[in-house]
Image: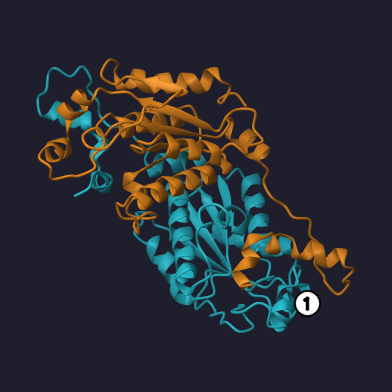
Chain colours: A orange, B cyan
Amino acid sequence: MDFFMSLLSKTAASPYQEIESEGDKSSDVVWHLASVSHAQRETANGHAPAVLWFTGLSGSGKSTVANAVDKMLHDLGCKTYVLDGDNVRHGLNGDLGFSDADRVENIRRIGEVSKLFVDAGLLVSTAFISPFVEDRESVRAQLSDSQHSNSQFIEVYIDTPIEVCEQRDPKGLYKKARAGEIKNFTGIDSAYELPINPEVHVKTAEQSIEACAQQVVDYLKCNGYLDV
Amino acid sequence: MDFFMSLLSKTAASPYQEIESEGDKSSDVVWHLASVSHAQRETANGHAPAVLWFTGLSGSGKSTVANAVDKMLHDLGCKTYVLDGDNVRHGLNGDLGFSDADRVENIRRIGEVSKLFVDAGLLVSTAFISPFVEDRESVRAQLSDSQHSNSQFIEVYIDTPIEVCEQRDPKGLYKKARAGEIKNFTGIDSAYELPINPEVHVKTAEQSIEACAQQVVDYLKCNGYLDV
């Protein structure tokens, strides 16, 4: 057994309490572990926590809608954050490459970090293509051991026809994929598996971004996330 | 080039803006990317963000003091969270073993996640032994590219004599280490490298936990973190 095993249990959480219970009168510290409960965080924030898991093709508008939702929620007084390629891929997942295993690990870590943000009481939006049902359902399962009445995993399908995404093609990625310069590009030579029963389904080719974002915020309003 | 390369750049952040700038009048969406700034998060929270990096021996009281600080800051209206073995080791770092490389990766990921929480505007406390100066300084460097006037890395040395830690030994880990059942146990057969110039230095064997926690909160107060 390695000392790191100590991290697997609540070793350091209540040493003083245990000393006291063992009757060690030489200790001058008496301590009942203070920690902030989920309920206290919710009450302070005025809303329930959840991850808004945006999924869709490259160029579909995931980050754009996610940031718009984030701004709307912030303006409503919510505590929020956005996880996307900009802040995750260079840092936490900077050691990951592009193999199948690394793609799975990429989504697993994002799911775990989302769970920490939810545990901290935030409404966290994630904006990653996340093309495979199995990976998304794994994250849903990661977040399912909650004591909350509401689900803490809200799948937001950014449904944009690939023709529109390809027309937008802001970085020329579709062009490169069509030319064979990029392999395993979602929608071209790698599958995008449609969400089976997403909590929110928005169509950026048919609605303004504000309307799309409002639809997500309305979902939260109508399902009691914003009235704690 | 793989499609995942798209995550390395701001690909999805402003597709509509780019479409507009290219003069694509067929698009019915016009969008200036809305995102919440650091300043807006600070103003809403009423405090600056930072990571309080607790370091010290097993049984020194890191988690206990960290949770006490977290509670005090929460009661002051701050947005806070604690990262420790309980919520990190099973989840995000559940794939890591106990090799030297994995120990470094453990601390690296905790540093990166701390950085995300700081980016989200929180005062996040981390409670890990983190025995090596190099690893702690790496995290300090990870957090040094800030635009904030205050440092976002605050090292809190939980300075407790090993004799006291060993006497507390709530899980019997020191006993096992002394018996040779645990190898590479910090303080027994693996080094704990003292913090060189920690921002806060508390002694749990000489002060109550409340006094220790208050000392950390006072550091934040006196250095302008709580008056934004």
Q: Quadrant of residue B58?
A: bottom right
What is the x, y in percent for residue B204? 70, 70
Q: Is residue B141 above or below residue B176?
A: above
The type of residue carrying mark 1 is Gln
Residue B152, can we see it? no
Q: Which quadrant holds the C terminus of chain A?
A: top right
Q: Quadrant of residue B183?
A: bottom right
Q: Which residue is mark 1?
A: B167
Judge from the rendering whether residue A7 lies leftward or rightward of residue B27; answer left or right. Answer: right
Judge from the rendering whether residue B90 lies leftward or rightward of residue B41; answer left or right. Answer: right
What is the x, y in percent for residue B36? 38, 37
* Mark 1 belongs to chain: B
Q: Residue at x 40, y 55 (%)?
A: A92
Q: Residue at x 27, y 46 (%)?
A: B4
Q: Nearer the viewer, residue A121 or A197?
A: A197
What is the x, y in percent for residue A27? 83, 72
Q: Secondary structure at mark 1?
A: helix
Q: Which quadrant holds the N terminus of chain A?
A: bottom right
Count of labels shown?
Answer: 1
Residue A23, can we see it? yes
